Amino acid sequence: MSQEAPQEDDRQEEDRRLLARAQDGDVSAFEALVGLHQDRVYGLALRMTRSEADAAEITQDTFLSAYQHLKDFRGEAAFGSWVHRIAANHALMRLRHRRVAQAAEAELQAPEFTERGTLADYPVTDWSRDAEEKALDAELGQAIQQAADRLPEGYREVFLLKDVDGLSYEQIAEVTGDSIPAIKSRLHRARLALREAIDLFYNRDNRGV
């Protein structure tokens, strides 16, 4: 433990030195930063996507984004934390696109045929009821989205990472740099706020809205 802290301090000092040079236009300094952090970024992307190909692309996109916004980085956080956050965002976008593609593929499955070569019968659907339920789901989803948007940034981030994208507490801690107890506390408060929004949504009918 006593050896790890100085090593971490030395690494952050090296990051700051290279960052200052990179922000002044020294491409070799940025390449050195990439070399120092690419393994950790790749590891995070791999754990989130479970795909080596996706992780490799996310790593490239992460450092490209970091380079493009290098002059905007003010050093409020460590460089490593900053690129980890960029990597997490790229991974989350990749996961969302993957889920959308999987859903679209499921809807485009080929029709089924009977042994005689005719189309198989499908159950009759009550479209009016389905439309009503979809409208209600859409309204509820909008109410939840609005409530999530009103959450403080740290609470909203934890809620999205845990309840929307399904990351573990350990993965969230690695992305945010916060302790697991702190993450659990913020998630609990975020869930309470969203539960209140859901209660208000359903209770509006009792008020004749």
Image (spheres, grey):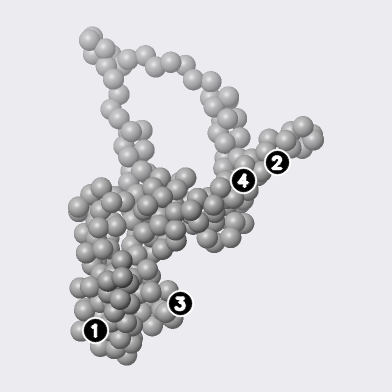
Q: Which residue is drawn at 68% across and 35% down?
A: 202
- Mark 2 or 1: the one toward you: 1
Residue 200 has which mark? Answer: 2
Measured Cα–Cα span from mark 2 to mark 3 = 38 Å
Q: In which quarter of the image is residue 69?
A: bottom left
Q: Residue 170 at what x, y percent from top left?
A: 37, 52
Quick check: 167 above or below 178?
above
Pick whichever of labels 2 and 3 is earlier in the sequence.
Answer: 3
Measured Cα–Cα span from mark 2 to mark 4 = 12 Å
What residue is pinned by disc 1? 29
Q: In which quarter of the image is residue 65?
A: bottom left
Measured Cα–Cα span from mark 3 to mark 1 = 20 Å
Residue closest to the eye, 128 or 55: 55
Q: Residue 203 at what x, y percent from top left?
A: 72, 35
| Label 4 crowd (10 A; few <14 / some 14-19 / many >=20) | few
Give the mark count.
Answer: 4
What residue is pinned by disc 3? 76
| Label 1 crowd (10 A; few <14 / some 14-19 / many >=20) | some
- Labels 2 and 1 touching (C-beta < 8 A): no
Measured Cα–Cα span from mark 2 to mark 1 = 54 Å
- Left or right: 192 in relation to 123: right
Pick whichever of labels 3 and 1 is earlier in the sequence.
Answer: 1
What residue is pinned by disc 4? 192
